[in-house]
Image: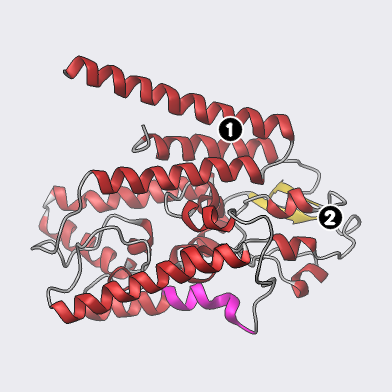
């Protein structure tokens, strides 16, 4: 039995490697990025959901007050995480240092991918991406954000960090995350738990399913995810950029229309600036009729960094998917 299972696991890993290789081939062959990146991204996200649920879900128990090992929850309760690591150092309890390794892993991924994690490596992000791809055209036009709504993810991140610190609980995970797949970390009180589950379901239905379906926008990733705000700041240490060549830009605003995360705004476009919230998905680059947009290194427009970015993204994304998808 173990031999059969071992062969099956080996075959599954081989199939995953072939799939990633096929995506790389299509990305290189077609010269376009977004479509095949999306196939890879959506497949990885749904595979994670199915694998995670099939492996069983823990319920509320003695570990319910701990933050889950999820990049979204950790970022939104980072002060709690830092304090826990301080206590681990003080106690000399080496197993408690475990979450510290996630910090080094995050730093490595950020140096390699930066904001591109949110369109190539995040095993949640492909969910709203998938629903945004179902219909050929948007039924509800939504190309720009009013006022300061662009900074909503940063506000959610800050509020979550402060509430997590004062309550000693992962606040975003407990009250707002539509991606929560387990009943762990929920309040033991039935009424409170029902309220939590109701908020999860409402956010899931609206931000992950309905609005992406109607608008072709990644609403959760673009407007609600605190990790997106976290990466928009720290991701600046990464050299990859999406840049606009002023001499080739005609201000047609097609990039504003197709950007799924509202990272290109009309005002910024006039100055040929892309928002730090850009997650390198390639939609604007593929849609630009004059070729004014492209991947660069540190904004140097004499460098075409597309293939280098694709290589980095598929190596990291392939490794992440390989942990659960086979």
Q: Which residue is mark 1?
A: 23
Location of the C terminus (image quadrant): top left
User: Which mark is drawn over residue 33?
Assistant: none
Tell me where residue 42 appears, x and y as whole percent.
50, 46
The one nearer the camera, 136 or 99, is 136
Tell me where residue 241 appears, x and y as whole percent.
67, 52
At 67% from the left and 42% from the top, the residue drawn is 33
Question: Between marks 2 and 1, how big is the CA–CA gap?
Answer: 28 Å
The one nearer the camera, 235 or 211, is 211
The rendered magenta stretch, by its main secondary structure, is classed as helix
Assess whether residue 192 is covered by the magenta stretch: no
User: Upstream in the sequence, badge 2 or badge 1?
Assistant: 1
At 77% from the left and 72% from the top, the residue drawn is 266
Packing grade of label 2 (10 A; few <14, some 14-19, many >=20) is some
Assess whether residue 149 is covered by the magenta stretch: yes
Q: Which residue is mark 2?
A: 245
Residue numbers of the magenta segment: 147-157
Left or right: residue 52 compared with residue 233: left
At 53% from the left and 36% from the top, the residue drawn is 314
């Amino acid at each position: 039995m173990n031999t059969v299972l071992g062969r099956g696991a080996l075959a599954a890993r081989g199939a995953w490697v072939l799939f990633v290789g096929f995506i790389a081939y299509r990305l290189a062959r077609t010269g376009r990025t977004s479509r095949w990146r999306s196939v890879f991204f959506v497949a990885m996200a749904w595979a994670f959901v199915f694998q995670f649920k099939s492996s069983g879900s823990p319920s509320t128990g003695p570990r319910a007050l701990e933050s889950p090992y999820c990049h979204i929850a950790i970022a939104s309760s980072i002060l709690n995480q830092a304090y826990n690591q301080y206590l681990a150092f003080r106690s000399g309890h080496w197993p408690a240092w475990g979450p510290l390794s996630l910090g080094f892993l995050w730093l490595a991924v950020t140096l390699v991918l930066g904001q591109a994690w949110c369109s190539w490596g995040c095993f949640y992000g492909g969910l709203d991406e998938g629903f945004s791809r179902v219909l050929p055209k948007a039924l509800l036009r939504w190309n720009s954000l009013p006022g300061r709504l662009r900074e909503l993810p940063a506000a959610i991140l800050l509020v979550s960090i402060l509430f997590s610190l004062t309550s000693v609980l992962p606040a975003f995970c407990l009250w707002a995350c539509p991606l929560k797949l387990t009943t762990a970390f929920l309040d033991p009180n039935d009424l409170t738990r029902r309220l939590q589950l109701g908020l999860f379901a409402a956010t899931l239905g609206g931000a992950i399913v309905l609005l992406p379906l109607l608008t072709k926008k990644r609403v959760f990733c673009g407007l609600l995810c605190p990790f997106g705000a976290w990466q928009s700041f720290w991701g600046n240490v990464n050299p990859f950029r999406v840049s606009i060549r002023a001499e080739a830009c005609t201000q047609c605003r097609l990039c504003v229309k197709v950007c799924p995360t509202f990272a290109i705004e009309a005002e910024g476009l006039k100055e040929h600036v892309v928002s730090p919230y850009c997650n390198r998905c390639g939609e604007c680059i593929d849609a630009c009729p004059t070729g004014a947009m492209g991947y660069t290194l540190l904004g140097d427009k004499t460098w075409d960094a597309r293939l280098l970015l694709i290589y980095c993204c598929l190596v990291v994304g392939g490794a992440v998917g390989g942990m659960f998808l086979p």
